[in-house]
Amino acid sequence: MEFRVSFIQLLQIVLEIRTVTSPDNVRGGDNCGGVVDLTQVGAMTITATDSDNDGIYDDNLDCWWAFTVDEGTIVFESNFFNIEFQSSCGFDWVQLLDGSGEFLGGQAKYCGTTIGSSFQTTSRSLYLWFHTDFCCVTGGPPTGFNFTVKAVLP
Ligand SMILES: *[C@@H]1O[C@H](CO)[C@@H](O)[C@H](O)[C@H]1NC(C)=O
């Protein structure tokens, strides 16, 4: 638990730095992370960065998103998911952390093609971390993800 709380704090620090250095991210304007107030935008769809549009997501990514709502909770939906499989998701992964400190779906990392189609937070924030290693994406094309994140008003 202490680890998770400090992990959230670390993410918040990283995201605050990104917010300051990259104003586009405040609006969720680039496709590799950002701080998004869903109270304002309602819902947002994000996809894995694929700079050359070959259906294979980029190497060496660490994309962090922080989604928040002023009131209520957040629903996460997966429309598409295909991330290089490894038994402990040790190469490339997606992590979904509820602001409560719990991992959504109870799993710390997701890879392969298996992720719940829908999750709901118990808190007003959702942190999403997409990590890829240096090479060798398998399992596609197409690979990557397409997620929709929505505000749920109380
Ligand atoms: C993401 O998935 C939704 C729902 O299937 C679809 O309408 C949308 O076009 C997709 N977006 C991208 C960028 O692939």
Image (cartoon, rainbow, N blue to C red):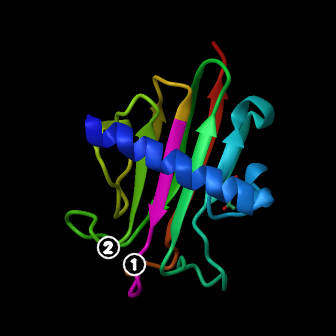
Tell me whether the residue at label 1 lies in contact with that at label 2, contact meaning CB atoms closer than 8 angstroms: yes
Q: Residue 47: which numbered mark, if any?
A: none
Q: Which residues are magenta?
A: 126-137
The residue pinned by badge 1 equals 133
Q: Is mark 1 within 8 Å of ligand 1?
A: no
Q: Is residue 55 above or below residue 47?
A: below
Q: Is residue 31 left or right of residue 145?
A: right
Q: Residue at x 66, y 47 (%)?
A: 35
Q: Is residue 154 left or right of residue 41?
A: left
Q: Is residue 48 left or right of residue 38?
A: left
Residue 152 visible at all = yes
Q: Is residue 5 above or below residue 142?
A: above
- Give percent across and percent down for residue 73: 56, 24
150 and 108: which one is in front? 108
- Give percent across and percent down for residue 123: 49, 24
Q: Residue 91: which numbered mark, if any?
A: 2
99 and 89: which one is in front? 99
Label 2 sits on a secondary structure element that is: loop
The type of residue carrying mark 1 is Asp
Residue 103 visible at all = no
Q: Is residue 30 magenta?
A: no
- Give percent across and percent down for residue 21: 72, 62
